[in-house]
Image: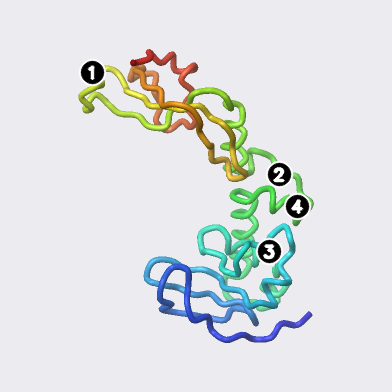
Amino acid sequence: MPFATSPQPRESLWGVIETAEQVLPGIWRVETSTHGELVLSDDRQAAMPDALRHDAPQYEEDVLWSLPVLAFEAEFANAAAVGTSTMLQLAHDIARNWRPDAYAAFTGTAIEPRDSHVMRRRAAYEALIGSVVVTSASGSWAEWVPEGKVGVVGRKVASVDYLGWPTYEGPEHRGLVAADRYDSGKSPNAFAALDVEPLP
């Protein structure tokens, strides 16, 4: 179905609109001083496939923009603007990585954890539901942490959302771990795997 052009959006979730361009009829790319997004007309939002539709017609520029680009991929491809093929590939890559469930539902493609940071994070936290994991860590610069140790604070993982972010429950746990055993780049870090010495 052909879509009509739409008036420029008056506002953005990110503040005053500084630049705006209607990239396809009913799809505006807007920028503020801090962020940007694609804004869909009512007709475009209604035409979004269920798997890709966001609650609001604003699709921020980091991840969500990829969803309407996938939904209307043929139109974007036919527009033949400079950089379109790169943009379309990037939309697939971003949606597959950051919205793997939506991407799989829309494309019918099975997504493997190796293809999605979100799936890897979700699986890692799901494997630790009921376990205490590190939520913050301090070096020996903190007065409660002796030299050669890392002080860790953690909570029990209660559940994990679709983006792989955990919900915690219960009290905080504090402890010490040998500095050479703690890898701040690893997440999640389970207390049990680190042999944390509990502190009162």
Question: For numbered disc 4, what is the local secondary structure?
Answer: helix
Q: Which residue is mark 1?
A: 147
Q: Quadrant of the C terminus?
A: top left
User: How many numbered tags mark residues here?
Assistant: 4
Contact flag, marks 3 and 1 (Cβ < 8 Å): no
- Where does residue 134 sit, x and y in percent of width and height? 43, 28
Q: CA distance from mark 3 to mark 1?
A: 52 Å
**Of the residues tagged 3 and 1, which is closer to the observer?**
1
Q: CA distance from mark 1 to mark 4?
A: 51 Å
Task: Mark 2 vs mark 1: give the one in front.
Answer: 1
Amino acid type shown at disc 2? Ile
Q: Is residue 146 above or below residue 47?
A: above
Provide the secondary structure element on which disc 2 rests. Answer: loop
Instruction: From this view, report whether residue 60 is shown above or below residue 29.
Output: above
**Mark nearer the N terminus (3 vs 2):** 3
In the picture of the structure, the residue carrying the numbered disc 3 is 70
In the rendered structure, which amino acid carries the disc numbered 1?
Glu
Q: Which mark is residue 111?
A: 2
Instruction: Tell me, yes or no, whether the two marked residues, 2 and 4, touch with CB atoms within 8 Å.
Output: no
Check disc 4 and give the amino acid type.
Answer: Ala
Pointer 4: residues within 10 angstroms few (<14), some, or many (20+)?
Answer: some
Cα gap from disc 2 to disc 1, whole angstroms: 44 Å
Q: Element under label 3?
A: helix
Amino acid type for the residue under numbered disc 3: Leu
Dots 2 and 1: beta carbons under 8 Å? Answer: no
The N terminus: image quadrant:
bottom right
